[in-house]
Amino acid sequence: MRATTALLLLLLTATEATGAAAPPAGELTVALSSFANEVLDPALGGHGVKFYLALMFDYLIGVTPDGRLSPELGIATAWEVSPDHRRWTFTLRRDVHFHNGDPLTSADVRFSILRAIGPRSTTGYAGVLRALLDRIETPAPDRVVIVTREPTLVIPPYLSRALATEGMILPKRYIESVGDDEFARKPIGSGPYRFVEQVTGSHVRLAAVPHHWRIGTPRYQTVTFRVIPEESTRMAMVRRGEVDIADVSRDRVREMEQAGFPVRYRDNDSLLHLWWILPWDRTPVRDRRVREALNLAIDRREIAATIFGGKAEPAAIPFGLTWAFRDVKLTVPDEWRYPFDPARARALLAEAGYRDGFPITIFAYQLPALPEGREMAEALAGYWQKIGVRPTLVPVDYPAFRKQWVDRTAPGAVGYYNLPNRDWIGTYTLLDKFAHTPSRPTDTVADPEIDRMLDAILTTTDRTKINELMRQAFARLRRDHDGIPLVYLHTPYVTSKRISRWDPGSVMLDLNIDGLVAER
Amino acid sequence: MLRFVLARLSQSAITLLLFSVVIFGLARATGDPLTLVLPMVATEEDFANARRYLGLDRPLYAQYVTFVGRAATGDFGTSIRSRRPVVELLRERLPNSLALAAFSMAVSLLIAFPLGVLAAVRRGTALDSGAKVLATLGQSLPTFWVGIVLIEVVAGRLQWLPAGGSGSLAHYILPGFTLGWFVVAGLMRLLRSAMLEVLDAEYVTTARAKGASEVSVVWRHALRNALIPVVTFAGVYFAILVTSAIVVETVFAWPGMGRLAYEAITGRDFPVIQAVVLVTAAIVVTVNFAVDLLYAVIDPRIGLAS
């Protein structure tokens, strides 16, 4: 016994002395209600599958768990821009290899970016890159130069983990030898975990590489992402210890906490934002007072407390994604927060000539991570009825609503989405789709001044001015009540008892699994 | 015989062809699948790229001709959602559905046989009443409810069995029982009725008069004759179990055809919807064809020429 203890102590001391980490062991299982489209090729996936692809691939620009660009966490260890802000030079990390042994070089970076904006790509954010990129040069294996048509500051954040999948680096030689379709079935990346198998509708399984520059020696030998649509099943799996992390609905949080399972939140994970379908010009909502009245009629605190079980907070600014606020240094003034004031709402309606109200259509649908969608729409109708508006609820599914929205066949009708929170560049891309008139048909705001601000942001090369433009855009959207910012939703995740610490981070649609699997 | 087979084969082919038209039209009537596949911030250019890449920008008749032409060779195209060949997805899922259906059917037969026979033999007793209650519940309780209750209690609270997914034999038990209970009910009721009819038959009375034991009368003479309708019923039910386990497969996260159909329908994945429905139709048509042939062979009174 004494000899065994001595041997253990010796081993422990030796490990500490050499700094050697324990080899990867065991399995980490993440169960989610949906995997979006379950693809393995970053060019097909967009941000919806980032949470598992980010373990298989490295980004050109890494980000910290709180969303700041980091030369330590991406393939680019440094980047600089020419004085005219049109040539971006990236210095690449050396000795990085793909899982098949091929070295990662500037040729792979060039290939990946061109593929991300190519005709196969459906990532969703490639449009701005297509418009901006002139050419990509590869003067050395560890150097990439991106030349843009216009001066810009957006290239690094656009190719970072803060956004979608455009910045993921793929193996050129492998894809060219096996073809796009085979790569989409058996992807190879350079991340800390390599692809093992996928059964669509069931799971994606990854296995650890022995050591990785980004996280050290991975803690778990395998990481399995399982798609389990039924919540009862997911929760039972957590109870049985079959699953380490699972998304849980806001109304089952208490039950799991009482059973002793830790619940972690992605605070302000999304903004539940409502808008009126354009064109407004022949509808009552063309009047700013009507839009303000519809905002004032809603008791956001009550909605947050009841429908969302207290796991939400009132929002104040249309498209006001809070992770962008810290980047652009915006502090929301108290007077911007909408009070619940039905009397003032009725007065505003009367002032605008709608003393007897008016009919309005509310499309009611559920969305991924928003099972409360229809309930929320019903509550909204109730609030508006109380100020004399005559809402009609139209139950549909999201695609049916989207068709009416982009075809503009229901002017003035209300739709909504739980917009994932994001940094300033992500917010810019969102505003570019939702508030930029030339980006029709998904525009929801008809304001030439906002269009001008957004156009200017893309080609402004002074970060201070960009921040100023973003703050001005938020202020104007709030002043004109260009939408209904309802609540910020906190997304709960229940974990098994063995997950002692986990920070799910604040990067758009990224669960920071890196933080769990990284060497400690 | 050859004429009969050819006639039935051509009827089956026409049925499948008509089906292909209906499902092709209905799948597209539900809306644009790209709104669910592409991110919300996708531009119209992204939509146009994806449409072109997937061939959805071509005229409908051209898409239909391509679909039927390829389907005839076993190629159902590429999934819009996962961008993988649909045949690969079917190959992944169909065996899981067959395995779950086989397990459910085995469980159903094991429960339904003794229960059906005993309920008939002990007509009017507590056992008979209990069996009737079991059958009524099995046919009236929705499978999603049964599934969730079993998950919450057996997997979640008692932690006796896995809640979902596939893998070991233990993973089969809860979905297998949920799926099988409905079949148990049907099989048991049918077997009970058939047994009651047979037990009153003259040859059973004769067997008893000849001094055969009650066990022999019931299990050798009566059951053998009562089995004919039950076996036919079980065959049809097996096809139904394979092709219609959408709810059970979804609740238990079982990666089978039903789950694939659910994902395809909610994602408006035309190629997968078409393939699943056509394969389902083909299974049903094949089973019917086989049954027709079997009847014709077994009972010559069913005119082959007709």
Image (cartoon, grey):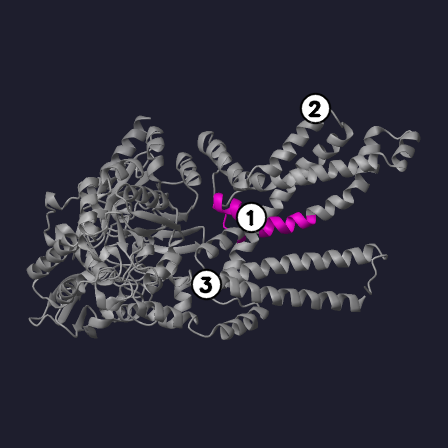
Q: Position of residue A91 (x, y in %)?
A: 16, 65
- State the image quarter where residue A116 is shown: bottom left
Q: Does label 3 lie on the same chain as label 2?
A: yes
Q: Residues within 10 Å of mark 2 (few under 14, many from 20)?
A: few
Q: Position of residue B211 (x, y in %)?
A: 91, 29
- State the image quarter where residue A121 is shown: bottom left
Q: Earlier in the sequence, mark 2 or mark 3?
A: 3
Q: Amino acid at mark 3?
A: Ser
Q: What's the residue at 67%, 37% (across, down)?
A: B110
Observer able to see residue A368: no
Q: Along the horizontal axis of the image, is B139 left or right of A203?
A: right
Q: What's the residue at 26%, 50% (across, down)?
A: A273
Q: Earlier in the sequence, mark 1 or mark 3?
A: 3
Q: Secondary structure at mark 2?
A: helix
Q: Does label 3 lie on the same chain as label 1?
A: yes
Q: CA distance from mark 2 to mark 3?
A: 54 Å
Q: What's the residue at 12%, 47% (across, down)?
A: A332
Q: Amino acid at mark 2?
A: Ala
Position of residue A283 relative to residue A392, above or below, is below
Q: Chain of mark 3?
A: B
Q: Along the horizontal axis of the image, is A266 left or right of B164?
A: left
Q: CA distance from mark 1 to mark 3?
A: 21 Å
Residue under label 3, please give it: B79
First to last magenta residue range: B235-257
Q: Chain of mark 1?
A: B
Q: Earlier in the sequence, mark 2 or mark 1?
A: 2
Q: CA distance from mark 2 to mark 1?
A: 33 Å
